[in-house]
Amino acid sequence: MFLQKIDLVYPAGIDPKTLTALYRKPHHKANTQISKAILQLHDQQFPSPFPADTQALLNIYNRLLSCKKHPSLDQDIKDFMLFLSSDLNFGSDLRKARLHWLKADMHLDQLPTLRNNGQLPALSQQKKLALDHYLQAYQLLEGIKETQQPVSIDDFTLYKLQQNMLACHLNALHSDKRYTDASLKHYLSHSNFIQSSKRVLHTEPYQWIIARNGLRFSSINKNNQDCDFFYRALIRANHAFKDFNYAPNGAPPIMHSAEFQWAIAQLS
Amino acid sequence: MLKNIIILFTSLLIISGCSSSNEQESVKKQAPVAAPIESMEAMDSSVFSVEDDLNTQKELLNKSKRAPSILIIVEDDDMPRLD
């Protein structure tokens, strides 16, 4: 059934073994055509609740960002931001929420470079802007969810925004500061991020990224019980994570990451 | 003919003589110079400082055995954004 649906979006077909490997082994990276087919099928089965024009803007930005050889990359991103600053005031709350989300993404993406270059005032400014826009998106979507409008906003969508807000705090810091930074600890203690992660894992247990982030922040919080919970969830999502040196696609091994060291010491 | 052989032989002798004198000079350059008293004292103090360093390192090692081991930080593991 699933293979038939894949054939509809990708007539060349995908070998079931390839699909199994991509599902079972998170370090496997699909080629461009298979990625495109799977994403297309995913969009058909789980359509985005956001207007198509906002999704198109997000896609344009992502493609621009991934094209490092683009000759006027910095200027085009600045122009894009200028356009968004004006455009996010128009349309439905759902549209506004997605555009605030996109603008926040653009500020968040600048943090690692500013941090590594030691540009502290600009780093602080971009972090604040990213957090402001994510918060506005979150409040708009919460409002939509509570009023039970025709468009449904699920827990996972809100979780994504929470995770991105946490990423603003975390990515603004060098690894060696992440155990001790007051603003990160303050945000963690006043947000329900850990509880939200547990809730989303209950409905989507194969999401190893959520389990990995839960383990990371339980380690920073030095909470033994939560570390144990998220480590089990990580292994349930994929057995390969039993090895602390396992590197999934898009993330380093937890053994190499400073934030996980407290958790590793407890779990070993 | 004989004259040419004599010239060749003489020039060979001169060349070999030059190279042997260079070897002697290079041997002289490589030979250790007698160290004055001050430099001997300096050497002694440097030996002591190496010993001190070793003691410090041993102390640090002992301390690190008592403290929980922290693994080496390799990279910043940044969180990717979710959309």
Image (spheres, coloured by chain):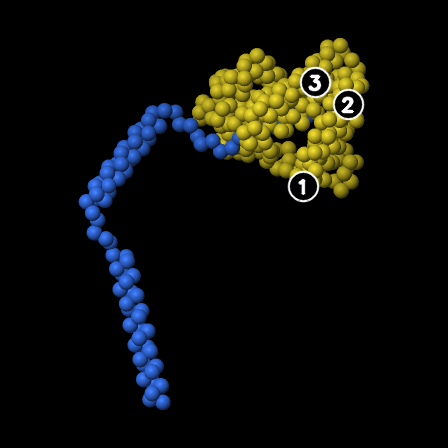
Residue at the location (50% across, 32% down)? A256
The crowding category of the residue bearing disc 1, from other C-alpha atoms within 10 Å (few below 14, some 14 to 19, many at least 20), is: few
Q: Earlier in the sequence, mark 3 or mark 1?
A: 1
For the C terminus of chain B, the quadrant is: top right
Q: Earlier in the sequence, mark 2 or mark 1?
A: 1
What chain is colored blue?
Answer: B
Going by the numbered disc 3, the residue's amino acid type is: Ala
- Residue, disc 3: A137
The part of the image, by quadrant, that contains residue A47 is top right
Q: CA distance from mark 2 to mark 3?
A: 14 Å
Q: Nearer the viewer, residue B35 or A257?
A: B35
Q: Are marks 2 and 1 in contact (CB under 8 Å)?
A: no
**Residue A243 in picture, x, y percent from top left:** 50, 32
Residue at the location (68% across, 19% down)? A133
**Residue A60 in picture, x, y percent from top left:** 74, 32
**Label at residue A87:** 2
Q: Indicate the chain on which mark 3 is placed.
A: A
Q: State whether residue A25 is above or below residue A223.
A: below
What chain is colored yellow?
Answer: A
The part of the image, by quadrant, that contains residue A70 is top right
